[in-house]
Image: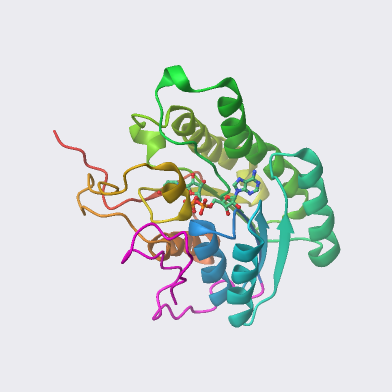
Amino acid sequence: TSNSKSKVPQEGLFPEIIRENYKGSSKLQFKKAVITGGDSGIGQAVAVHFAREGADVAVIYKESDDDAAETKKLIEKEGRSCILLKGDISKKDFQAECLDILKKYWNSFHILVNNAGIQFPKNEISSISDEQIKETFEVNIISMISFTRDCLEFMNKGSKIICTTSVTAYRGSDHLIDYSATKGAIATFIRSLAVNIAEKGIQVNGVAPGPVWTPLVKETFDDLSTFGKDNPMKRAGQPSEVAPAYVFLASEDSSFITGEIIHVNGGDFVGG
Ligand code: NAD
């Protein structure tokens, strides 16, 4: 099933949320998963894959009620339930409100996917404002640490935390300077938290996507003609090609893996 939003990046490159032949094999049966930024792009694909694998999903999103309603519909089509939680994850009050509602409906949950993220259009260091730096850090990493801390109260032994970092955490980025710094911080957070809570039986891993066709890139890249062309596979990926890595990390198949990051990027060799 592919979705056909008006904000798709380019004709012929519609974001594919899940492959039609992705069967699912009950890998997440009876699980409850919370996904920040689960209404769009990679997060939406993760939400739908989790539902096809048998999980109920709570989707945290900021703005688009249309995207959220569509995601809920796709989750319910898989026979699973969906809780929609609308607000700004970087605000303490909203984080607390989410946890109150999740406690009421679910009591506890098994999977937390920290995926919400923002980036501003590419620019030179000289034109990055203090407000931009602050917002990028608050949404991408500061709130991730505090929300995860507060979620841990609702997660028991065997639970999984998965964070979305980025290829830019490793390569850097020529013009997404503050953004790539937040993604580097997320990569370090994954490793540190994994060690900190390993004895509780909770695993923490991450996914570092390379270029993926999502609304985010449409909104922040001026020229998409070269998007994804500098990796060995010479193309950007689809959300449907990234989400299975999250399924693996959320399932029992990854039972001996913690503090690791799966790179899903078409290869990141840049020459030499
Ligand atoms: P997207 O814009 O489609 O999705 C981002 C989601 O984050 C949206 O659902 C939005 O509701 C949510 N969000 C943003 N700010 C929020 C806030 N303050 N509170 C609550 N929710 C908020 O983009 P995407 O490309 O699917 O991005 C998902 C993640 O993947 C991000 O962390 C992004 O940095 C990362 N990523 C994307 C790419 C790519 O090429 N698309 C590459 C590497 C990493």
Q: Residue at x 46, y 62 (%)?
A: 243
Residue 192 colored in magenta in the image:
no
Residue 210 against residue 47 in the figure, above or below: above
Residue 264 image point, x, y percent: 36, 53
- Residue 48, picture quadrant: bottom right
Q: Specify the quadrant that holds the N terminus.
A: bottom left
- Residue 107, picture quadrant: bottom right
Q: Which residues are magenta?
A: 1-30
Q: Specify the quadrant that holds the C terminus.
A: top left
Nearest the viewer among 18 and 65 is 65
Q: Residue at x 49, y 23 (%)?
A: 128
Q: Residue at x 23, y 48 (%)?
A: 229
Residue 18 against residue 269 in the figure, above or below: below
Give the main secondary structure of the magenta stretch. loop
**Is residue 207 visible from the viewing direction of this image?**
no
**Is residue 49 visible from the viewing direction of this image?**
yes
Residue 209 image point, x, y percent: 40, 49
Q: Residue at x 63, y 51 (%)?
A: 202
Residue 8 colored in magenta in the image:
yes
